[in-house]
């Protein structure tokens, strides 16, 4: 069963404006399924997973395009970057939008080839796993999230849903890959075991020389245990028993492959007291929970990672609301050397909208006390919010609301 994706509208719009559209993202997030669902009947599908077609594409790109004429949907384009210059020639000759739809993992060599060969001719859009609303079949019409009181009040009055604690942590524990999020019968441990093995075999070896797969798996687990924390490469390398340079390289690979996200700090030259280290987040909480060994939603909810995994899930959901609308997420975090911290700042038109994430159903004004640091530093601040387990969206202070997790897009 196909679940409508928020990205559909933007992808079709991009295809009407550019001759080439590339959908990137981690494996198994649904790139091919999305494009095959929205393609026109005349658009032919070609998968470079087919060894014979891949050999033709690499050996004789000109013959490949004589055999397969646009409009085309080419799957796994990263395996045959030799096709990209020929797409440029086809695009320049035809001067028609929507000639080529491509899917591919966002890897270094592929993105370099795209930027060099198709500059000005390609729309690059990013797809993450299913958002909660997409998993519920309500992915159409989701807008980028901003904690504006009027929209929160309207959403609260219009919504009758409530995301209870067991339901929430079950969704977090299972994760957002469509094969598992949309199929309750799928064995979660079997899925992620296969995913990690496939990722090691097909992606990492194409990007880096991983001589010791055990060391890389250990690195994945150590990084997962640090989700929603400040990134410290030295500690990460020490605990994974690898060099700092190796940790830096492998982290870059995870980032480029859509496995992790680095949230940069918000800082200005006017203040040198702000921390400049990014925070590390796994983009899929199911994979993160699997790598850190939580055997059930109940143990995850009651365990030491409960708060960090909730923050990870919230950041991932908010990222989807932007990326799946074709918007760059203007996300930052705030932390100064006095350890005042704000989990997330959404900065729009030079105004910072602060958000805090807490696993509480009884929020109080003290939970958002760090918001005042923005005014003291002269940072223009908009209304903020505390994303928590409260039942209703209600004013918490004069400039902050409680935001139930069930109201997230």
Image: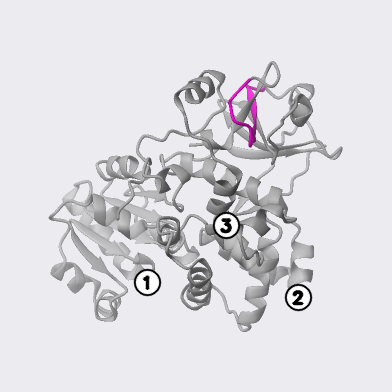
Label 1: element kind: helix
Does the residue at mark 1 contact the one at mark 3 (Cβ under 8 Å)? no
Q: Residues within 10 Å of mark 3 (few under 14, many from 20)?
A: many
Q: CA distance from mark 2 to mark 3?
A: 27 Å
Query: Which residue has dot 1 on it?
Result: 79
Q: Nearer the viewer, mark 2 or mark 3?
A: 3
Please state the extent of the stretch shown in magenta in the rendering: 381-394
In screen coordinates, is 173 left or right of 367? left
Up the image or down, 371 lies above or below 120; here it is: above
Q: Which residue is mark 2?
A: 241
Camera-near label (1 vs 3) is: 3
Does the magenta-highlighted stretch encompass residue 58? no
Camera-side residue of 279 and 193: 193
Label located before the other in sequence (1 or 2):
1
Residue depicted at 52% across the width and 56% down the height: 175
Q: Residue 62 location in percent, x, y?
A: 20, 71
Contact check, label 2 and label 3, Cβ < 8 Å: no
Residue 368 lies in quadrant: top right
Residue 287 versus residue 396 in the image, above or below? below
Badge 2: how crowded within 10 Å, few (<14), some, or many (20+)?
some
Judged left or right of residue 42, residue 347 is right
C-alpha span from label 1 to label 2: 32 Å
Q: How is the image coloured?
A: one colour
Q: Earlier in the sequence, mark 1 or mark 3?
A: 1
Q: Residue at x 41, y 61 (%)?
A: 179
The quadrant where residue 275 appears: top right
Q: How far across and down, in percent of the image, does residue 151 sit?
A: 50, 22
Q: CA distance from mark 1 to mark 3?
A: 32 Å
Q: Is residue 228 visible?
A: no
Q: Earlier in the sequence, mark 2 or mark 3?
A: 3
In the drawing, what numbered circle is on residue 173?
3
């Amino acid at each position: 069963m196909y679940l409508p994706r928020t990205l559909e509208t933007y992808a079709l719009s991009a295809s009407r404006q550019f001759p080439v559209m590339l959908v990137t993202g981690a494996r198994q997030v649904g790139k091919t399924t999305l494009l095959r669902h929205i393609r026109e009947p005349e658009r032919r599908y070609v998968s470079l997973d087919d060894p014979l077609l891949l050999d033709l594409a690499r050996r004789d790109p000109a013959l490949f395009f004589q055999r397969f004429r646009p409009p085309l949907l080419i799957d796994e384009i990263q395996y045959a970057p030799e096709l990209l210059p020929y797409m440029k020639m086809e695009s320049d000759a035809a001067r028609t939008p929507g000639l080529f739809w491509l899917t591919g993992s966002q890897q270094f060599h592929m993105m370099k080839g795209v930027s060099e060969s198709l500059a000005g001719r390609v729309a690059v859009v990013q797809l993450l796993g299913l958002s909660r609303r997409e998993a519920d079949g309500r992915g159409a019409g989701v807008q980028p999230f901003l904690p504006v009181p009027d929209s929160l009040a309207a959403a609260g009055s219009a919504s009758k849903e409530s995301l209870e604690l067991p339901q929430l942590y079950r969704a977090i524990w299972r994760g957002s890959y469509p094969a598992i999020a949309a199929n309750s019968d799928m064995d979660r441990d079997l899925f992620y075991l296969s995913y990690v093995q496939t990722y090691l075999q097909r992606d990492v070896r194409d990007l880096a020389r991983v001589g010791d797969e055990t060391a890389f798996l250990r690195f994945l687990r150590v990084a997962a245990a640090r989700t929603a924390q400040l990134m410290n490469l030295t500690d990460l390398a020490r605990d994974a028993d690898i060099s700092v340079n190796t940790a830096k390289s492998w982290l870059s690979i995870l980032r480029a492959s859509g496995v992790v996200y680095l949230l940069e700090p918000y800082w200005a030259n006017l203040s040198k007291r702000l921390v400049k280290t990014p925070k590390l987040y796994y983009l899929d909480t199911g994979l993160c929970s699997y790598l850190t060994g939580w055997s059930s939603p109940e143990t995850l909810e009651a365990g030491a990672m409960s708060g960090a995994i909730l923050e990870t899930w919230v950041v991932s959901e908010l990222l989807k609301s932007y990326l799946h609308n074709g918007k760059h997420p203007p996300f930052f975090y705030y932390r100064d050397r006095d350890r005042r911290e704000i989990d997330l700042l959404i900065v729009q038109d030079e105004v910072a909208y602060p958000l805090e994430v807490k696993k509480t159903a009884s929020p109080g004004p003290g939970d958002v006390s760090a918001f005042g640091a923005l005014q003291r530093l002269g940072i223009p601040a908009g209304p903020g919010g505390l994303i928590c387990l409260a039942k209703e969206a209600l004013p918490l202070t004069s400039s902050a609301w409680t935001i139930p997790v069930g109201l997230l897009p």
